[in-house]
Image: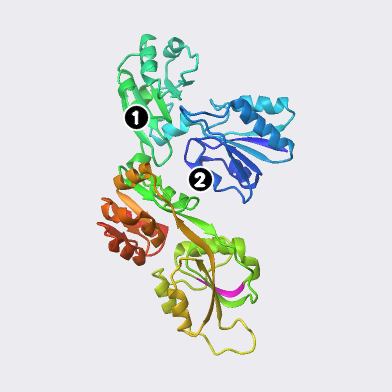
């Protein structure tokens, strides 16, 4: 089989190439780095083996030789392998070493280039690396402490100098470039977490570079182009605001993308996780209606019971649930405008008198969470329907660590898409100074009951409505 050395880009998951994404969705194994966007891992198919080989500062790390061995071993047993690397595999990504190891072992490989942080990060920060009349050359250099860069030679190069992996050595680099002849008032910039929702750009001079507070990952640029401030990401309507997304891991990506595109700093802090329950197949599988009250119920249904349940019509609560259903090729037949369980019951038709055939004419199947409320069942039964429900999954609260608690307490907005998010936050709800933005009125009521100081309710139950609520605050 083949090993694909795929560049994931500098951080924004949308910057991966079409080919790279297709390979991620079909491969057997993904061997990924620390800086490869986590959202991309959610694109892998069920059963794909995920191997974390990320190298972290000041931590015991897996060696490059061990990574090479993993790639060779998985390929030789007939598996399709994606080696997912931040940025571009061949720009200080050690992709060349991995390609050499694969070639030496007789393993087929392909390289799928990625957007290098040396260019992509600066584009997101509003700094073109070349600009007519200002800079027509570009030098990319590593600032890693183990490198043997001739800084005197670099200093003699005119144009733009981009330094990768140089954050911790920035003071020494600044002094070396000045010693080589670069004027101390030369414009510089340092961009942390570029192209992500955590991006932060700081402008300075070469003399000030060593004193600017910054942490990796970051890209440093030295040269006159640093004066240009064509920023767009950090000038969005939510620039300077921070948002916590509490959705379960794997389902936070869309909300993160929406807020990030508006310039907000987004922190994904899941407060719950979903656990699928063992569900026996249904003996009677034909129903007039199948009713879904959440996107999770759709996803779990299609991974467990879809093959044994046939519905003539489908009803949903919320636009997000309708979209989840549409991803399986089915359009919702019924959805209330205000996207609440109560409103779905209100517009649901009354059951008609039953005939011998078809047997499904007055029966509804309702897949739900183990802790789901019974209001839909009772409301539909009051309209004459026979409701068959199954608990397909349960939502388990996650305990936040100290760092997560600090981030929640320091954020401007905390998004709440389900009451279970509120329950997981528990007693700290009353202490949160930021605004809780709830998808539904029930979540808002739960938040107020627990003493929340500031609560916003989205106009309807959709992710876009949550974003609109934050924008209007």
Residue 424 left/right relative to 90: left
Nearer to the camera, 430 or 331: 430
Residue drawn at (50%, 17%), measured in percent from left and top?
147
User: Element at badge 2?
Assistant: helix
Q: Which structural element holds mark 1? A: loop
Tell me where residue 156 sits by quadrant: top left
Percent x, y for residue 160?
42, 21
Query: Considering only vertical position in the picture, is 114 above or below 14?
Result: above
Magenta stretch containing residue 347, yes or no?
no
Residue occupied by mark 1: 228
Comes first in the chain, label 2 or label 1 = 2
From where the camera sits, is residue 273 visible? yes
| Residue nearest the viewer, comparing 138 with 470 | 470
State the extent of the magenta-drawn residues as a range: 310-315
Which residue, given by chain and number where applicable, does mark 2 sit on? 39
Q: Please say whether residue 326 is visible from this viewpoint.
A: no
Q: Residue at x 36, y 22 (%)?
A: 224
Position of residue 258 relative to residue 462, above or below, is above
- Residue 312 within the segment the image draws in magenta: yes
Mark 1 Cα-neighbour bin, 10 Å: few <14, some 14–19, many ≥20: some
Residue drawn at the location 64% of the way across and 49% of the way down: 47
Residue 470 location (% of width, % of height): 32, 54
């Amino acid at each position: 089989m083949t090993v694909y050395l795929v560049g994931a880009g500098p951080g924004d998951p949308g910057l991966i190439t079409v080919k790279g994404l297709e390979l991620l969705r079909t491969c057997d194994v993904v061997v990924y780095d620390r800086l490869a966007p986590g959202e991309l891992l959610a694109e892998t198919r069920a059963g794909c083996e995920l191997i974390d080989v990320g190298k972290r500062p000041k931590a015991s790390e897996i060696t490059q030789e061990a990574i090479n061995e993993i790639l060779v071993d998985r390929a030789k047993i007939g598996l399709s392998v994606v080696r997912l690397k931040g940025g571009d595999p061949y720009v200080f990504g050690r992709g060349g070493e991995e390609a050499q190891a694969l070639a030496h072992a007789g393993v087929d490989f392909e390289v799928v280039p990625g957007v290098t942080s040396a260019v992509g990060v600066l584009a997101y920060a509003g700094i073109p690396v070349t600009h007519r009349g200002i800079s027509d050359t570009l030098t990319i250099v590593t600032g890693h402490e183990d490198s043997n860069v001739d800084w005197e030679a670099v200093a003699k190069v005119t144009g733009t100098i981009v330094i990768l992996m140089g954050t911790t050595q920035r003071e020494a680099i600044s002094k070396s470039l000045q010693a080589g002849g670069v004027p101390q008032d030369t414009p510089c910039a340092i961009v942390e977490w570029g192209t992500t929702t955590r991006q932060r750009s700081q402008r300075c001079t070469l003399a000030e570079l060593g004193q600017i507070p910054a942490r990796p990952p970051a890209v440093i640029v030295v040269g006159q182009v640093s004066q240009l401030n064509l920023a767009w990401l950090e000038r969005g309507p939510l620039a300077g605001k921070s948002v916590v997304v509490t959705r379960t891991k794997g389902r936070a990506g869309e909300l993160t993308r929406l807020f990030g595109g508006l310039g907000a700093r987004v922190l994904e802090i899941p407060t719950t996780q979903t656990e699928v329950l063992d569900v026996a197949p249904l003996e009677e599988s034909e129903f007039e209606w199948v009713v879904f009250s959440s996107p999770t119920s759709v996803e779990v249904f299609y991974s467990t019971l879809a093959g044994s349940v046939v519905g003539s019509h489908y009803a949903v609560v919320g636009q997000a649930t309708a979209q989840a259903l549409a991803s399986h090729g089915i359009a919702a037949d019924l959805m209330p405008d205000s996207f609440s369980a109560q409103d779905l019951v209100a517009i649901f038709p009354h059951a008609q008198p039953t005939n011998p055939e078809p047997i499904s004419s007055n029966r509804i199947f309702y897949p739900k969470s183990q802790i789901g409320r019974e209001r839909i069942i009772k409301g539909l039964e009051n309209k004459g329907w026979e409701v068959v429900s199954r608990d397909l999954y349960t939502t388990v609260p996650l305990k936040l660590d100290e760092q997560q608690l600090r981030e929640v307490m320091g954020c401007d907005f905390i998004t709440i898409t389900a009451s279970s998010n509120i329950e997981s936050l528990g007693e700290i709800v009353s202490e949160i100074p930021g605004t809780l933005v709830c998808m539904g009125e029930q979540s808002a009521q739960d938040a107020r009951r627990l003493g929340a100081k500031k609560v916003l309710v989205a106009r309807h139950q959709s992710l876009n409505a949550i974003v609109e609520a934050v924008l209007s605050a």
